[in-house]
Image (cartoon, helix red, strand yellow):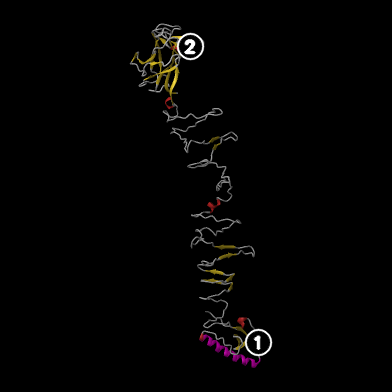
């Protein structure tokens, strides 16, 4: 501890003009004072005995004589240490209880309790505002009075965790962080953010894309004015909420292409995907009128970029009619228009053209005809082949198990093989009723362009002496085809 000598001039007091008696008294008092100070230095304590003086005082002196000015001594406890404070004083390991400190520099303070420090620079390693269980506050005031303050305080955490405010390395210049005049929260990041990264929020417009700024959706979750948008997966809407992808042309008010989705029978996905392209391609959707549908293939194209017959959906047992006038008589001649023995004939009625057989009365009469049919280009190789006659037995006579039969032969190089009709002769359940009589032709090995020679025979058996005959609409070929 440094103690400065107390002198009248040090306290700013001027010496008095004294008579000889007073001077002698002061000399004596000075001697007593010197002895008292020596006793204090030796004992290390100040006695509080007044020695005839009502209040313990330290008197100044001039020329070895105590002056009338003095410094009142503090009231001390046993073993207290008193010191005089000069222009500069260092306190080491001292306890200050609720003092007010104005000016100066404080260093290495362990605890200052309720100390008020005004206009003071505090240098230290760690500072605590409050203690665990006792809230503390750091208030920082601006230069102008009554203009608010910056307060730093803490709220309860879920456990005894600390929050650290620290800076990233700065190698350019002093940086100033300004809080806007808003009520809100400070955004945090798990990684360091640069000023440039933070600036993307400045001047961002809600619901509208602004160049080099963050994109913020509006209250309807809408964002407009993107120029180019790249993404790995894009969902328009969500399950239960319809979405639309609108694609606009370069000219305003000239329509758009909208891609939408309709409800499926279940939660199924329809995928549009391209086949491998050998070069850049442009596919144009023609104007098909008010409403149209795409024509889709059920399997991969046989020739890329082309729809061939084999790419089409197979239609089973499609009907190909054979006019009566294309049927030949048993001798290969054209059908007659009236009854001819052993032949069918063309029956021309009122706006009707039918196929008729020879009448039978108490006998069996057989009528024979021929058809030559070439399998068309759309025929599916080895597809089903049938021939159908919509026919009946009719007349006043009695039917006695009349039959109708078909034979089929494949012709190649002027020759035919065995009969390939797989259906046996058909009878008639009742007279005067039209029936579909279908005869299946074995299609093994058949292809488009093959020639089928078809022979058909009606055997009418009458047993009661009245006329009975075979009647038929124009026959039909039934084929499996594509296209």
Of 293 and 119, nearer the camera is 293
Per the image, is 92 magenta?
no
Of 170 and 373, nearer the camera is 373
Q: Secondary structure at mark 1?
A: loop
Q: Determine which quarter of the picture holds residue 383.
A: top left
Residue 121 visible in the snapshot: yes
Give the image location of residue 464, x and y in percent: 41, 8
Residue sitting at x 57%, y 90%:
32
Give the image location of residue 365, x and y in percent: 39, 8
How many marks the image carries: the answer is: 2
- Indicate left or right for 446 with 20 as reference: left
- Residue lying farthest left? 418
Residue labelled with disc 1: 16
Give the image location of residue 431, x and y in percent: 44, 14
Residue 456 visible in the snapshot: no
Per the image, is 20 magenta?
yes
On screen, 161 above or below 82?
Answer: above
């Amino acid at each position: 501890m440094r103690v400065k000598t107390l002198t009248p001039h040090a306290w700013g007091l001027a010496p008095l003009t004294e008579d000889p008696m007073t001077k002698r008294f002061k000399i004596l008092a000075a001697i007593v004072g010197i002895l008292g100070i020596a006793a204090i230095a030796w004992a290390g304590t100040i006695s509080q005995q007044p020695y005839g003086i009502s209040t313990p005082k330290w008197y100044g002196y001039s020329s070895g004589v105590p002056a009338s000015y003095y410094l009142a001594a503090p009231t001390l406890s046993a073993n207290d240490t008193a010191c005089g404070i000069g222009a500069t004083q260092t306190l080491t390991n001292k306890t200050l209880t609720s003092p007010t400190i104005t000016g100066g520099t404080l260093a290495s303070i362990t605890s200052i309790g309720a100390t008020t420090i005004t206009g003071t620079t505090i240098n230290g390693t760690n500072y605590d505002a409050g203690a665990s269980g006792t809230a503390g506050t750091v208030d920082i005031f601006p230069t102008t009075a009554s203009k608010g303050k910056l307060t730093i305080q803490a709220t309860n955490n879920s456990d005894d965790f600390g929050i650290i405010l620290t800076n990233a390395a700065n190698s350019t210049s002093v940086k100033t962080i300004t809080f806007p005049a808003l009520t809100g929260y400070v955004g945090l990041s798990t990684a360091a953010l640069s000023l440039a990264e933070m600036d993307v929020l400045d001047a961002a417009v809600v619901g509208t894309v602004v160049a080099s700024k963050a994109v913020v959706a509006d209250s309807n979750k809408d964002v407009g004015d993107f120029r180019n948008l790249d993404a790995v997966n894009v969902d328009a809407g969500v399950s239960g909420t319809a979405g639309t992808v609108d694609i606009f042309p370069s000219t305003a008010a000239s329509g758009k292409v909208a891609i939408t989705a309709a409800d499926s029978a279940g939660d199924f996905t329809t995928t549009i995907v391209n086949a491998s392209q050998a070069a850049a391609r442009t596919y144009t959707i023609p104007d098909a009128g008010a409403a149209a549908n795409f024509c889709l293939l059920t399997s991969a194209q046989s020739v890329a970029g082309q729809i061939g017959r084999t790419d089409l959906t197979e239609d089973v047992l499609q009907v190909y009619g054979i006019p009566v006038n294309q049927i030949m008589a048993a001798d290969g001649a054209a059908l007659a228009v009236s009854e001819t023995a052993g032949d069918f004939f063309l029956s021309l009625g009122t706006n009707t053209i039918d196929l008729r057989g020879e009448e039978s009365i108490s006998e069996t009469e057989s009528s024979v005809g021929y058809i030559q049919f070439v399998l068309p280009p759309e025929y599916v190789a080895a597809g089903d082949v049938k021939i159908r006659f919509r026919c009946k037995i009719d007349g006043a006579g009695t039917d006695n198990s009349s039959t109708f039969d078909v034979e089929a032969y494949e012709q190649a190089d002027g020759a035919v093989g065995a009969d390939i009709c797989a259906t046996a002769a058909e009878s008639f359940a009742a007279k005067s009723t039209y029936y579909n009589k279908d005869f299946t032709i074995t299609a093994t090995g058949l292809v488009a362009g093959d020639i089928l020679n078809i022979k058909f025979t009606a055997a009418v058996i009458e047993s009661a002496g009245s006329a009975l005959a075979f009647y038929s609409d124009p026959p039909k070929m039934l084929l499996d085809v594509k296209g």
